[in-house]
Amino acid sequence: TDFIEQTLSAPENAEESALRPLSFSDFAGQDKTLERLKVMVGAARDRGEPLNHILLSGPPGLGKTTLSLILGNEMGTKVNITSGPVIDKPADLAGLLTNLNEGDILFIDEIHRIPKTVEEYLYSAMEDFRIDIMIDQGPNARSVRLNLPRFTLLGATTRMGLLTAPLRSRFTLQTRLNYYNHSVLQGIIERTCGILEVPFEPAGAAEIARRARGTPRIANNLVNFCRDYAQQRGNGTITQTSAAAALELLEIDQRGLDEMDKQVMRVMAENYRGGPVGLGTVAVAVGEEAHTLEEVHEPFLIQEGYLQRTAQGRVLTEKGWHVIGLEPKGGAQT
Ligand code: ADP
């Protein structure tokens, strides 16, 4: 199975929770987003008001959940965590909202997957802190207004484009998390090694950073595997050599590409002359779910310049052809 995909979809275990930064000062990178959040937190605290609604977007594993917990800590309020697909009907939402206290944060992960019938109720909840729900049926059916405490909605999404405009517009701040650069990621890896008390050489941490796809959650998981590898095949210290060997064993190459990434590019090159080709078609050919390709593999391949998204479909770039050892031919490349 695919290590990267598994890492990003698995629920968090206790050891991972111990690695979560708890305050702004613990959180590395994402300078712009952090600055925006600090401004909003500072202002809300000065006015003694709840934080305004915030939408965090970006690929999985970059720190959206972490930031929501940090915002709770910084505001000194409780964070209630839920996710879009779990909120099945308006009554579920009403239940969540009426259980909140003044100033509480409601974190809705995967907010783009909230059903449309529920989404409409969210509008008045966010804007006016009330919802009108229908109770009873038939001749007794009537609408009841529920007043809500002033709460903060933190939405997280991997797919900003799937959010409707009316929902998006109700967030005061929409901010995007980007892949981390190698040096920031190296810092995160060294912090993780410190917390886990794993001996490491900086060059070993750097080696992991280069192959972690700019993603802290992947970096932390690679640290775990590299620690095991160093214990079993080395002297217990994560060195550059032992980290490189461990990651080769996971089939993660020097650029952070895994087998699935390469398979996607090979299918595009060999079966579709480099595209344009629809993502669904590629997904069937490689035996992976389209949404996994879209959320996990594609954003990284695009960010690194191997793939382009066009109106006609996905296109392999020259860099993409070369990374799988082929010369561009046919398709859109000529
Ligand atoms: P998301 O919600 O975007 O999928 P998470 O917030 O769950 O991502 O982050 C995944 C893991 O990565 C967390 O357990 C946390 O330990 C780590 N992490 C994320 N961002 C940072 C950061 N800026 N600094 C240190 N660790 C981080």
Image: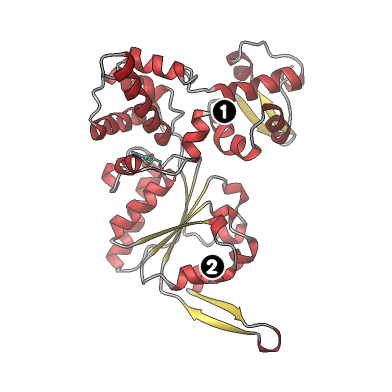
Q: Taking the image as drawn, is residue 127 in sight?
A: no
Pick the front one: 65 or 331: 65
Q: How is the image coloured?
A: secondary structure
Q: Residue at x 38, y 42 (%)?
A: 13
Secondary structure of the residue carrying tag 1 is: helix
**Rendered position, 14 above or below 48:** above
Disc 2 element = helix
* Image spot of residue 188 (x, y percent): 32, 33
Task: Tell whether 47 sits left or right of 3.
Answer: left
List the residue tagged with mark 2: 92
Along the horizontal axis of the image, is 39 left or right of 254? left
Q: Quadrant of the C terminus?
A: top right
Badge number at residue 45: none
Crowding near pointer 1: few (<14 within 10 Å), some, many (20+)? Answer: many
Decide which of tag 1 and tag 2 comes sooner along the chain.
Answer: 2
* Residue for badge 1: 301
Residue 113: percent from left, percent from top: 59, 54
What amino acid type should be assigned to the residue bearing mark 2? Asp
Q: Is residue 176 above or below residue 239?
A: below
Q: CA distance from mark 1 to mark 2?
A: 37 Å
Q: Is residue 196 visible?
A: yes
* Location of residue 286 by image quarter: top right
Q: Residue at x 34, y 55 (%)?
A: 71
Q: Is residue 241 left or right of residue 172?
A: left
Front in this rendered view, residue 75 or 13: 13
Q: Position of residue 166 (x, y in %)?
A: 60, 61
